[in-house]
Structures are given as structure tokens and as C-alpha cells.
Image: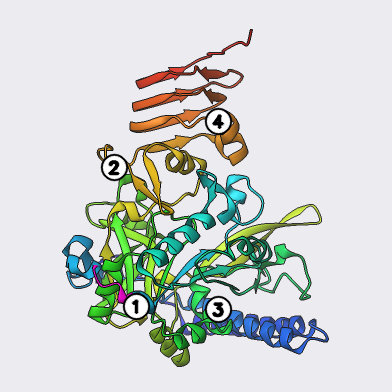
């Protein structure tokens, strides 16, 4: 146990903090009522908006209480490694579990589709970025489910949870799949008001205020949004019992019959797919046993003095992929009981007002932290191939390469590849997809690559092969052109190398 002294608050300190929280909550409630009054002449719209504001207020009250009590921090000494029944390895699940296809009638698939492509320099939903052979993330998701339905003569529906940032574009885009063998449904997650950090009052004062006044509150909002949209009841009425949820940019998150049937046989209400950590994954959340309960531990919850211990891949060996299998009737039951509380993630942002940057807060939740509320919940450590996210152009280079081939909308690793995926780090010159495409118009062969770092003003030619460890560093004011047909193996290239046209 920790021997450090703990500061004991006086009664007057508690009373002051409690009063401050009550005042902030009261002021927020009044401001939200005025915000609701700004919706005119549309009773349905006002009703939906009031429900969203009520959900936001519940989250805000919890934030104030937890902020003042400080009792929500985890006691590090009570954290234990999960038991063998709480985290299983994929290979220990019997293979006959993958043979029963009748359970597909109980399944629906949901892709989290609320993110924009701004971090990769793109306009609109991230799901429309072209990732492989002319296909976008959304194209590949549709092809995967369509192929599954054709192969097994099933009718698994695909749901898209959009945000107000992506909804209109997505609704327009999914029309092109109307002739495909797949039912696609989309719905919106909540739209919450950002909060001024200093006054703790909402940024918007009117329903029609600009988009930068609002935020989508993270994927923990999935449960409430499924209910409020009517999709939860509709799925249950169709006999759908299990929802497979994954990030829209995870190209490895395909339907797995082995996990589906394992979930049904064990009566688990929630399964989280984990995968083994590498040194690149040290910040990923992991499952723990806390007071006899399975919980997700995120890096933000870890006391500063234990951060290095949390990042130790020998102690915390795996992390959450955000591939989640969730029982829909359990979601309905828990929502009716009002008991799906998830850890609040306060996310600080800045917005511009009158030429000044203003600090604002957005209170978010993550659906992985809901695991502790479900009966029989456990983790399954899956192969790394089920976690293939594309967050940056470094990831994009890998998924476009000869390291993978496309099969029915799913990326499969080339069987001649040995060892883990290469570590690829592209510098700021490659941050935007447009810059990436200009500098690497032809994807190099990387089947034997272990590590690639490129920084500075670098351009790759056609038919380039990279093997082992390749580091290319171009200094400020210089340029490096890698010639067509180059084979680079275990090399460091610096300086200036230009190919002049003649």
C-alpha cells in the first residue's frame, strides 16, 4: 500500500465545493432551458433536442460531482490482472464455433461513422477516404457484409452511427449501394453543447448556432442514441440479439463466427476484443480486475506516478481494439434501469471568437468503459490482423502496399510476410492525403520492410522496394528524389538527391 500522506479536506472545503457545483449546475440548467426555447414551431424537433440536453445535463452534473469529490480515481493497489475466465485467448475457443452459421440471423453490424477526415487533410466523413484499389472505408465495409450475406445466404444489416458532422454526406453516399445485397441503416448520435472552460456555461445560445459550438460526445453515446433513434427496438423486434461494433477506420474488424457463437454459447452480454501490445501501443486501454469486476483502464485514469508501469507491456500485455460484441436486450435492460454509467473524458479544445482562442470543454464517454455493467462480460485476445486502423498517412501507406491483398472487402496479410507489421513513420510533409499522393504516387514494395522513417522534402519514384530498416532524412531547404526501380535495404539516406528532367 502507498505510505504517502493523504490531504484530508475540511468540512468547510467540502461545503464550498458542493455549493460551487450546485451553483454551476443551476446556471447550466437555466442556460439549457433557454437553449431549448430557441427551437420554434417544430414540436418534434424540440422534443428530441430537449432529450439530448437532458442527457447532456446528467453528464455535466456527474462531471461536477466527480470533479469536486475526487473519489472517482482508481486505487492502484486494488488493480489486479484479469483472471483466465475474464480474458480468453482466441485460439482457446473451440474451432467448431466457426461452423454454425444460423446465428447470423441474430447479428447486426455497426460502424462508428462520426469522424471527419480533417486529421488527414480531407474534407467530409473519414469513411469516404480512398484506402485500397479505389475503395473507401465505407465501400470495404459494405463489400464485407455483402460477401458474408451472399456466402451464407444471410441478411445481416449494416448500421452506421453518424455525427452531425457526417450525417448529410453519408446519407447521400449510401444511395449508391441501393442495388447491393445489404440493408444499410444510418442514424445520428447526440449533439451536445460545448462548455466555456472558465464559466462552465454552454457556448451556444441558440439551436441554430454554428457547428463549432457543438460536439458529438464520443462513442459511449452509442447506447442512448440507439434507443432514441428507435434502432434498438427495431433490431430487437427483428430478432437481432447481438451487435458487432467497430471503428469505421479499422480495416481488420470483420464478422467472426467463432466469436459470435462463443458469445451465444457462454451467454456473455459483452465481449471486448483485445490484442497483444507492442511498444507502439503503450497508451491503449486494457482490461483489469477491480474489486472483483472486469473494467477498462484507460491511460487518463492512471495516476502520474504509475504511468510507466501502465506502459510496461510485460505487465499490461494487451489493449482494447474497440471491436465490441454487445447483447442488445442487455442494453435495453440497463438503459431502462438507468445504469450504463461510463467514465467521463473531459476533452479540452479551443475555438476562435473575435480573433481570440477560447478554451472550451467537451465531456465525452467511450463505450468500452461500459463493460463493467454487463453480465458475463469478458475480453478475447485476438490476432493482430483484426486490428488494422488507419489514423494517419503512415497507416495508409501500409494498407495500400503489397503487404496485404483484398478478399471480399477484407484485407488479408500476404502469407509470405514474416513477423509483425512494419513500423512506418512519415513526417509532416506527408500528413495530408494530397501531399502523400503527390510524394508517393506509386506505393513501394514493403513485404520485407521492418522499419521506415521518412522526414522532409522526399519523393519516391516508381517500382521502389524497401527492405529491413530504411531511414530517409532530408534537411531543411534540400530535396531527395528516390529514383525509379530503387532497392533500399538497411540504409540511412540524408543530404540532397535530385533527379533533373532533360
Q: Give the residue pinned by disc 1.
A: 372
User: Pointers 4 and 2 in contact (CB under 8 A)?
Assistant: no
The residue closer to the viewer here, 167 or 9, is: 167
Q: Mark 3 and mark 4: span between their CA atoms?
A: 41 Å
| Secondary structure beneath label 2 | loop
Q: Position of residue 314 (x, y in %)?
A: 22, 52
Q: Mark 2 and mark 3: span between their CA atoms?
A: 37 Å
Q: Give the residue pinned by disc 3.
A: 225
Q: Is residue 102 left or right of residue 119?
A: left
Point out the tag, 4 or 1, that comes first from the N-terminus: 1
Q: Position of residue 320 (x, y in %)?
A: 35, 61
Q: Nearer the viewer, mark 2 or mark 1?
A: 2
Q: Which stretch is magenta?
A: 99-103
Point out the tag, 2 or 3, that comes first from the N-terminus: 3
Q: Mark 4 and mark 2: span between their CA atoms?
A: 25 Å
Residue 113 included in the magenta stretch of the image:
no
User: Pointers 2 and 3 in contact (CB under 8 A)?
Assistant: no
Point out the tag, 3 or 4, that comes first from the N-terminus: 3
Q: Mark 4 and mark 1: span between their CA atoms?
A: 47 Å
Q: Mark 3 and mark 1: span between their CA atoms?
A: 20 Å
Residue 80 visible within the image: no
> Which residue is rendered at x = 55% and y = 78% of the image?
225
- Residue 420: mark: 2
Q: Is residue 400 left or right of residue 490?
A: right
| Secondary structure beneath label 4 | loop
Q: Residues within 10 Å of mark 3 (few under 14, many from 20)?
A: some
Residue 100 included in the magenta stretch of the image:
yes
Point out the tag, 3 or 1, that comes first from the N-terminus: 3
Q: Give the residue pinned by disc 4.
A: 441
Amino acid at each position: 500500500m502507498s505510505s504517502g500522506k493523504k490531504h484530508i479536506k475540511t468540512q468547510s472545503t467540502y461545503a464550498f465545493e458542493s455549493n460551487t457545483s450546485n451553483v454551476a449546475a443551476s446556471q447550466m440548467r437555466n442556460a439549457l432551458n433557454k437553449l431549448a426555447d430557441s427551437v420554434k414551431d417544430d414540436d418534434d424537433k424540440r422534443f428530441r433536442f430537449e432529450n439530448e440536453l437532458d442527457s447532456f445535463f446528467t453528464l455535466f452534473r456527474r462531471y461536477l460531482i466527480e470533479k469536486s469529490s475526487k473519489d472517482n480515481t482508481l486505487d492502484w493497489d486494488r488493480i489486479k490482472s484479469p483472471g483466465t475466465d475474464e480474458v480468453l485467448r482466441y485460439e482457446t475457443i473451440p474451432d467448431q464455433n466457426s461452423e454454425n452459421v444460423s446465428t447470423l440471423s441474430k447479428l447486426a453490424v455497426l460502424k462508428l461513422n462520426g469522424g471527419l477526415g480533417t486529421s488527414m487533410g480531407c474534407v467530409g466523413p473519414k469513411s469516404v477516404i480512398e484506402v485500397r484499389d479505389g475503395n473507401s472505408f465505407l465501400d470495404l465495409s459494405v463489400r464485407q457484409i455483402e460477401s458474408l450475406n451472399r456466402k451464407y445466404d444471410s441478411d445481416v444489416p449494416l448500421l452506421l452511427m453518424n455525427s452531425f458532422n457526417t450525417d448529410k454526406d453519408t446519407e447521400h453516399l449510401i444511395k449508391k449501394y441501393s442495388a447491393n445485397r445489404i440493408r444499410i441503416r444510418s442514424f445520428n448520435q447526440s449533439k451536445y453543447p460545448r462548455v466555456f472552460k472558465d464559466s462552465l456555461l454552454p457556448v451556444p445560445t441558440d439551436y441554430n448556432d454554428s457547428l463549432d459550438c457543438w460536439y458529438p460526445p464520443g462513442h459511449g453515446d452509442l447506447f442512448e442514441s440507439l434507443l432514441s433513434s428507435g434502432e434498438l427496438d427495431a433490431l430487437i423486434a427483428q430478432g437481432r440479439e447481438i451487435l458487432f461494433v467497430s471503428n469505421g477506420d479499422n480495416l481488420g474488424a470483420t464478422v467472426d463466427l467463432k466469436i459470435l457463437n462463443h458469445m451465444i454459447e457462454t451467454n456473455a452480454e459483452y465481449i471486448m476484443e483485445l490484442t497483444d501490445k507492442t511498444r507502439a501501443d503503450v497508451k491503449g486501454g486494457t482490461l483489469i480486475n477491480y474489486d472483483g469486476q472486469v473494467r477498462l483502464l484507460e491511460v487518463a485514469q492512471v495516476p502520474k506516478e504509475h504511468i510507466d508501469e501502465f506502459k510496461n507491456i510485460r505487465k499490461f500485455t494487451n489493449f482494447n481494439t474497440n471491436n465490441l460484441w454487445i447483447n442488445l436486450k442487455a442494453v435495453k435492460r440497463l438503459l431502462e434501469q438507468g445504469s450504463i454509467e461510463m467514465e467521463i473524458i473531459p476533452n479540452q479544445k479551443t475555438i476562435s471568437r473575435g480573433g481570440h482562442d477560447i478554451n472550451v470543454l467537451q465531456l465525452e464517454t467511450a463505450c468500452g468503459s461500459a463493460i463493467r455493467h454487463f453480465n458475463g462480460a469478458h475480453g478475447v485476445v485476438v490476432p493482430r490482423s483484426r486490428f488494422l486502423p488507419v489514423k494517419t498517412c503512415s497507416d495508409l501507406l501500409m494498407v495500400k502496399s503489397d503487404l496485404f491483398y483484398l478478399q471480399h472487402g477484407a484485407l488479408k496479410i500476404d502469407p509470405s510476410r514474416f513477423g509483425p507489421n512494419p513500423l512506418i513513420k512519415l513526417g509532416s510533409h506527408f500528413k495530408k492525403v494530397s501531399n502523400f499522393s503527390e510524394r508517393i504516387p506509386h506505393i513501394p514494395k514493403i513485404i520485407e520492410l521492418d522499419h521506415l522513417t521518412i522526414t522532409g522534402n522526399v519523393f519516391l519514384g516508381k517500382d521502389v522496394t524497401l527492405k529491413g530498416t530504411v531511414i530517409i532524412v532530408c534537411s531543411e531547404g534540400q530535396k531527395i528524389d528516390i529514383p525509379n526501380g530503387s532497392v533500399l535495404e538497411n540504409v540511412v539516406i540524408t543530404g540532397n538527391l535530385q533527379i533533373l528532367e532533360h
